[in-house]
Image: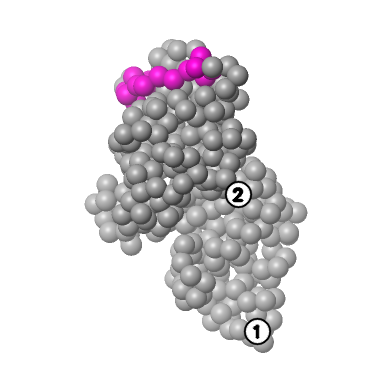
Amino acid sequence: MPVAAPLPLVLSMGDPAGIGPEIVAKALRERPDLRHQLVVAGDVATLHRALRITAPQAGSAAGGLMLAEIEQLSAAGDVPPGCMAVVQACALPEPATLGRIDARAGRAAADCIRWAAQAALSGKARAVVTAPIHKEALAAAGVDHPGHTELLQSLAAAHMGVPVSALPVRMMLSCPGLSTVLVSIHMSLQQALHAVTQEQVLQTIRITHAHFRRAGLAAPRIAVAGLNPHAGEGGLFGREEIEVIGPAIEQARQDGLLASGPHAPDTVFMRTRQGAFDVVVAMYHDQGLIPVKLLGLEHGVNTTLGLPFVRTSPDHGTAFDLAGSGQASAASMLAAIDAALAATPAS
């Protein structure tokens, strides 16, 4: 690939039984300028179907489709006008039945994620954007990871030749006006409470700081949420803020990071949206994700922090109930693409 040519983004199509292929097709139809900047890792027949579903009135000419190797996509002229560049990244004998959990669909989705990750890890892609997958389909396919974050972490660690524990990652969910990073993600609430340790909280603060510094913010203001109501109210409602979270924040401040808290979790998200902070570190999955999804699910972006490449994703699921209807919005997918482009140089 010529040195001067911009590297493409790679989009994985997501679960072929869900809305992933449709929102990919919609995004590229709504924003034709993006077609020269990315390649879709997916299944050609599935994406042909998505194009027909999302623009049935225009027939097969709408949007177009081209199968191409990533090395052929080094220049804008390589993608003919009106076409979507696709790499056959999975083995799927026929398009999956829409709206149903299927091990074959889960396997295809995982294969597309692996292809996209390897493209980024090998320096052939500038970033990865992933369409939604279904966790039950992934499990049915025998994939030993509950979601994108853990699978990408495992792939990156293997590529780097280090154990997974040596590559800590975190999930950040963002919508206009609010970003939140999670100390723990896909585990039971009981397990998540045990995961609130001084080491885990401090590590999350450091990973968050590093991400925003790379994004160009010299001194990110990191608000750390408490675990208990009113951030423990001085120990009346629990001592985690005093014995665990507070010491982690103090260590981060000694390291020169602008971390503050523990803040009352019922007000810190509002204060951040009002401009008091740049990002919130939340103690567990639902504490951090409920406010983001309430404020802006349709424009939400999931970013994995700590990977050796940028990865973003729409902040919604496979929406099996909408699959095949052509009604799913591409707004969150477009927000994820724009976030990945903004976070990476075009070279």
> For the point 75% across and 54% down, which residue is it?
274
> For the point 54% across and 39% down, which residue is it?
323
Q: Is residue 181 above or below residue 160?
A: below
Circle 1 residues within 10 Å: few <14, some 14–19, many ≥20? some
* Alpha carbon separation for disc pair 1 and 2: 29 Å
Single out the residue that lies furthest toward the left: 161
Counting from the top left corner in percent of width and height, residue 156 is at 33, 48
Q: Which residues are magenta?
A: 60-74
Residue 115 sits in which quadrant? Answer: top left
Q: Is residue 215 visible?
A: no
Q: Verify whether residue 215 appears in magenta.
A: no
What residue would you read off at disc 1? Answer: 237
What residue would you read off at disc 2? Answer: 174
> In terms of secondary structure, where does tag 1 sit?
loop
Single out the residue that lies furthest toward the bottom: 236
> Marks 1 and 2: CB-CB under 8 Å?
no
1 or 2: tag closer to the N-terminus: 2
Q: Which quarter shows the C terminus? A: top left
The three-letter amino acid code for the residue at tag 2 is Ser
The three-letter amino acid code for the residue at tag 1 is Phe
> For the point 58% across and 83% down, which residue is it?
239
In-image side of 159 versus 176 (left or right): left
In-image side of 245 versus 347 (left or right): right
Counting from the top left corner in percent of width and height, residue 259 is at 59, 63
Disc tally is 2
Q: Verify whether residue 67 appears in magenta.
A: yes
Counting from the top left corner in percent of width and height, residue 291 is at 66, 58
